[in-house]
Amino acid sequence: MNEIIKNSILRGDCVIFLGAGASYSSLNNHNRNIPTGGELKEILANAASIQLDDEDTLSDVYSAALKSMGNERLNRLLDDNFRCAIPSNEYKILANYPFSRVYTLNIDDAFEKAAYSINRKNFKALGRNDNIEDFDKFYSSMNLIKLNGDVNNFSQGLIFSSEEYGEGSAYEPLWYQELARDFHKYTFIFIGTKLNESLFNHQIKRYQSYTKSQNGKSFLISPKFSQAQREKFSNSNIECITGTLNDFVQWLDHEFPNGVKPRDILKYNGIDLFNNDDQDKLILFNGVTPVSRSSISLKEKKYDHEVKDFYKGYKPSWDDILRGVPAELGNTKEFLSKIMANSDERLFILLGSAGTGKTTSIKQIALLLSEKQDKNVYFIDGSYENLKGLIKELNTRNDRKYFLCIDRIANLATDIDDILSSSDGDKVLFIGTENLKIWNYRVEEHLIKYFPIIKEFETISNDDVDLILDKIKEYGNWTRLSKMTLKERRIELYKKSKKQLLIGLLEATSGEGFDKIIKKDYENIINNEEKMLLIISGIASMHRSEASIDIASRVLSYLHIDKNIYNIIDNMVGIIRNENGYLTTRHRVYFERLVSRVINKELMISVVTAYIKAYSVYKFPIVMNISKKDALIYKGIVNFKFLSKILNDNKDDVLNIYKSYEKILEQEGLFLLQYGLALRAFNIHDDALSKLIQAREAYPDSAHIEHAYAHQLLILSELASRDSNDAAAMDYLNKAITVLDRLTQVNKKLSDSYPLITLSVSHVRILNNLNKKDEAQKKARDYFNKLNNTFPDLSKNENSVINKTKRFLITYYSKGELIPIELNNYEYDN
C-alpha cells in the first residue's frame, strides 16, 4: 500500500471495488466459503450434469445450466451457495470505514451482512438499475452497488451469461454509467478481481473513447500477477499491488489505529469549523461559518500581488474580506450603524439590485459585528438545508442573543417566519440580503409583519469613490486608471458605477463596455469542454446556486465531453472555482448578460437538455432526493419562465425541451407542472390542463400543483364564459372552487393567500362574463372582507399582490368595473 491510497481515504475520494475473491472468506449457510468464479463453474456443471471442458468459461456453463435447470431451480442453487451466514472479519473492518461507495461484482450478501452486524449507519445496497444517489458530502453514508445482481432480489436479474452481458451492454444500466464516471474522478481500490468484467470494461472504454484521456490513479490488489498483466493494467493507470483483502485491512489498522471517522475527513478537507463529534451536528453545521478573525484564517497565497478575482467580477471570498480587498462603502457603514443602534431588533434586511455589492456588504458587516459586539456571529447562504434545526442547536450553544447573517434569504423566508413566530426565535437576530424585486415579489409578504429595519443599496456616493480607487490600485487592474488624473479617475468610476457597481468596476478598469468584456472573455476560452463547464456552472449562478461536481460531470458526459472534470477545472483557474465539491463562477449578472448577448441558442439548448437528463437519474420527486443547492438548479432549469427567457419566448424551442423528456419524467411532478405552465403561457390551455392533471397524479401532495391545476380550471372557465358556454364555465368554476377552498383552509399564513387571491379575482370575472353582475358584486365584497380579515397586508408596497387584489375587488364592488390585474406571475416551483 502507499501514501496515495492513504491520502485518498483521508480526502474521502476513495472507492472500493470488490470481486469474487473478496467474499471468499465469508461463509454461506452450509458453513462453506462463498464460491469463487471457478468453483461456481463446477457447482453449476455438477447440478446440471454438464461435462466440463478446459476451455469452458463461467458464462458458457451458466448459460447451459440455465437452459437445463430453468430459472427457478437455478436461483435456488445460487441462493443455497451465495446467501451469507457469517461475514468475514475483513468485510466488517472495511464496512466500518467512510467509503461513500463500494461497487461489487458479487451476487452474495456478505458485505451487507457485515455492515448490519456492526450496526453501520446509513448503509444501503443498490442494484445496477436503481436510481443514482450522490456521494455523501458528509461521508456518513455508504452505498453498496451490486452490479451483477443480488441473491436477495433475483427479480432484478443476474449477469453471468454472454446473453446477459450483451443485454446489459445494450441497455447501459445507470450504475454502470456512473461507475465509468467515478473511475475517472476517484481513486479506485480493486480487490478480489482481475478486471475481466465485460460490462465494466465496455463502459470504461466507451468513456475513454470520447476523451482520449487517462483515468485517475487506481490500484488492483491480488495475490499474484504476470508481467503481461502488470503492463496491461499500467496502460490504464492501474497499479498492481501483490496482496489480499486481509493484507489491505491489516494495512488500514496499521495506518489508522483509531480508524477513520467522517469528522476526520471533514477536518482534513478544512470543513469542520465546530469541532463536533456528533455526526448529526457535523451535517447541521455544514455550510455554517462562525465569523471571527480567529475562526476564518487567511489562506496562504502563492501570488499575493496578483489581480484579485473580486475585481474580475467574482463574489468576495472570506479571504478577500479578511484582507480588506473590497472597499468598505458608505452604505455598509450606515447599515452597520443601524444594526448596532438597534441590536435588539429581530430582523435586518439589505436590499438592492443584482451586482450592487450586497454579498460583500453582509460579509463585511458580519466580521465587523464579531469585533464590535459581544454577540456571536454566524453566516450561511440561502441554499442552507435545515435552518430550523440550526437555530435549535445554536440556541443551546448561546446563552445570549446572536446574529445569523444570510446571503439571499428568499428560499428561507418561510422558515424565518416560522422561527420568529415561535419561542425558537427569542435569541436569534437575522441579517439578510435580497434582490429588491425578489423581496417585493415573494419575500416581503412573509417577513414584513416583523417590521424589519431595511436598508436599500443602489449606487455609490462621492465619498466612496476614493476608497474604491485605493483598493483598485492595490488589488485590481490599475493600468488604464493610472494614466488618468485623480479627477478623471473619480469622474470615470462614478459615472460607470451609476449603471451598477459590478459593471462599473469592470468597465472603469478595462476601458471597454460590459458586453465587449464578457464577449472577449468567452472567446478567449478555446477548448469546447471548458466552455461547456463554464455554461454549466454559470447556469447554476443564474439560479443563485452552485453546480455540484457530481452533476456537472454527468452533464458533460451527456454532452459527449467526458474528459476528467478535475483536469478541466485545473485548466480554468481564475474562471471557475471548486469549493468543497461545488463549482462557482462569476456573478450571475455577468453570466446572464453572457447568455443573452454572446452564447448561441443551440448551445444553450444542448446544455440545458443535458442538465435535465443529468437530474433524471434520481428518484422522484427529484427535489426531495437531492441537496438544496442542487434542487435550486433543477427547479430553475425546468422552470418555463427560465426556458422562455433564454430561448427568447420561442414556443417550439421551449416545448421541444419538455417534449424530449415527456416520457422519462412522466412521474416527476415538478417537471410536469412546469410543462403545463409552459403550455398555459403559449395559450394551449386544454393540453395545459391535461399536463397539470398528470402532475397531480404524480405528486398528489403538492399544494403548488393543486393551485396551478385549479388556476387552469379558472382560465378555462373564463374562456368558456366569454363564449357564453355557461354549463362548461360553471363546471370548471365549481371544480376550481373545491380545490382552492381546501387549500385556503389548510393554512392561514400570509403565504397561503394565493389560493384566495386566484379564486376571488377569477370568480368575479367569470360571473361578470356570464352577465351575473349582482352576484359578482356580492362575491367581490365577500372576498374583499375575507381577504382583509384573514390576510391583512402590512406592506406599504401598493403593488403587493394582496393590495392589488383588494383594489380590484373594491373597485368592482363599488363601481361594477373590472380593472386589469395579472394572475400569471406566481411561481409554482416547490
Image (cartoon, rainbow, N blue to C red):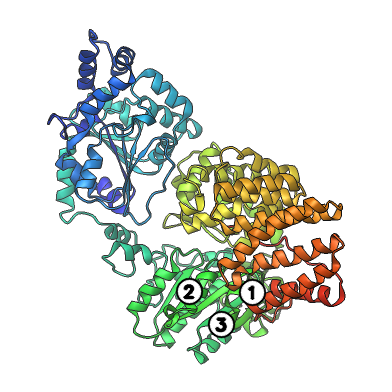
Who's the residue at 36% across and 44% down the image? 186
Q: Secondary structure at mark 2?
A: helix
The quadrant where residue 326 appears: bottom right
Q: CA distance from mark 3 to mark 2?
A: 30 Å
Image quarter of residue 61: top left
Name the one closer to the observer, 633 or 237.
Answer: 633
State yes or no: discs 1 and 2 in contact (Cβ < 8 Å): no
Front one among 605 and 452: 452
* Mark positioned earlier in the residue sequence (1 or 3): 1
Amino acid type assigned to the residue bearing label 2 in the image: Ile
Query: Mark 2, residues whose alpha carbon is within 10 Å: few (<14), some, or many (≥20)?
Result: many
Q: For this view, does 338 lie left or right of residue 596? A: left
Q: Amino acid at mark 1?
A: Gly
Q: Quadrant of the N terminus?
A: top left
Viewed as shown, does residue 801 lie left or right of 280?
right
As drawn, the residue found furthest toward the bottom would be: 341
Is residue 312 among the parts visible in the rendering? yes
User: Where 159 falls versus 768 (above or below)?
Assistant: above
Query: In this figure, which residue is indicated by the disc labeled 2?
Result: 321
Give the residue displayed 43% in from the left and 87% down from the top. Answer: 372
Rounded to the nearest angstrom, the CA distance separating label 1 from label 3 is 20 Å
* Distance Cα–Cα, label 1 vs label 2: 20 Å
| Secondary element at tag 1 | strand
Can residue 572 be seen in this snapshot? Answer: no
In the picture of the structure, the residue carrying the numbered disc 3 is: 450
Q: Position of residue 211 (x, y in %)?
A: 49, 35
Mark closest to the chain's N terminus, 3 or 2: 2
Residue 388 screen position, x and y as percent = 43, 70
Residue drawn where x is 50% and y is 54% of the image: 630
Tag of residue 352: 1
